[in-house]
Amino acid sequence: MKKFFITLVALFTATFSINAAAPVKVIFDTDMGNDVDDVVALDMFYKYMDEGAVELLGILSSKREAGSVKFIDAMNTIYGYPNIPIGIAKTYPEEGYVCEDKRLNYADYTVSKHTYPHTIKDWDSVEDGYKLLRKLLSTQEDGSVTLVMVGFSTNLERMIRSTADEHSPLDGKTLLAKKVNKVVIMAGNFHEKKKEYNVYKDHFAAVRFFAECPVPMYFSDVVLGKSTLYPYQTVENGFKYIENHPLVVSFNYYAQMPYNRPLWDPTAVLFAVEGHKGYASLSKSGYVTVDQKSITNFTVDKGSNRYYYIVNDKQRAAIVRRIVELTLRTPKNLQR
């Protein structure tokens, strides 16, 4: 009996290991260049890929500045993942989009100040974000993709309004419903009744996407991110495996060091890849609306499939520990 039990445990462990080893298929949508927590989030994805936990199918930028794509391409190349396709929101809606700040963003600054290896040779060849999203989803198994959106809703809202094309005969909303299992999103402020950056920067895109997204949405809101801080010591003492690491350059340009930065976007990445258990609990189901002042409201509704994450002090500490541990690793495929 003892031998049988040991064998049974071994079989269960092996089965669990096989299941656990299946990578999470992710498409990452970022506004790289606005806040430096996007760089931490992107670093996390490379480290997850190093350990086989993630298959990063593509990266979309919801910013139109070329520096955003150049920064992402430099990071892909440095970390040894040069073939990850990149898309950018090439055109913006006439209504609801707030113009970019005049201040040079850290992505533009970093790639102009330092020489990094690049993979993309023709920046004009970078695909429109929603079109790349259609292409990527069309090749995936049904229900297999997780979307992680930590910027504006521009690309995804355009996606669900898109029509059949050379990649798929399905309209965008149907294609997304067929291929995507959930959207994990950094957006909203459900506690302070204040507008939130990712929402008001493309207001009408957020209004439509939050209302019409056909799959479950999980929100890591601004209050949660503000309560979990990336320690400045991690920036100052880590990332020394290359000179002028883009993350370090970005942090130093963004504000005068030393400072701790809220982990808005990295929490969304963590929950999307590892799940929220041990790191957060979920709200009741409900629906999310955006009012005329870009303030997000959450209304409990058993029939809805929108949720937001809730954390306590113990979970906040676990989140910070995990993100610091992950990002301090030296990349396995580093290109110097």
Image (cartoon, rainbow, N blue to C red):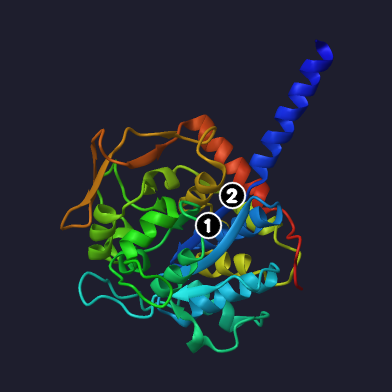
Q: Report if residue 33 is visible in the image.
A: no
What is the quadrant of residue 196 in the picture?
A: bottom left
Q: Position of residue 305 (x, y in %)?
A: 32, 42
Against 35, is 230 above or below? Answer: above
Q: Position of residue 101 (x, y in %)?
A: 35, 74
Looking at the image, which residue sits at the far right? 3
What is the quadrant of residue 3 in the picture?
A: top right
Neighbours of disc 2 within 10 Å: few (<14), some (14-19), many (20+): some
Q: Who's the residue at 66% across and 57% down the image?
A: 49
Q: Position of residue 40 (x, y in %)?
A: 57, 58
Q: How many marks?
A: 2
Against 196, is 169 above or below? Answer: below
**Is residue 122 shown left or right of residue 327?**
left
Q: Who's the residue at 62% across and 70% down the image?
A: 75
Residue placed under numbered mark 2 in the picture: 231
Q: Report if residue 315 is visible in the image.
A: yes
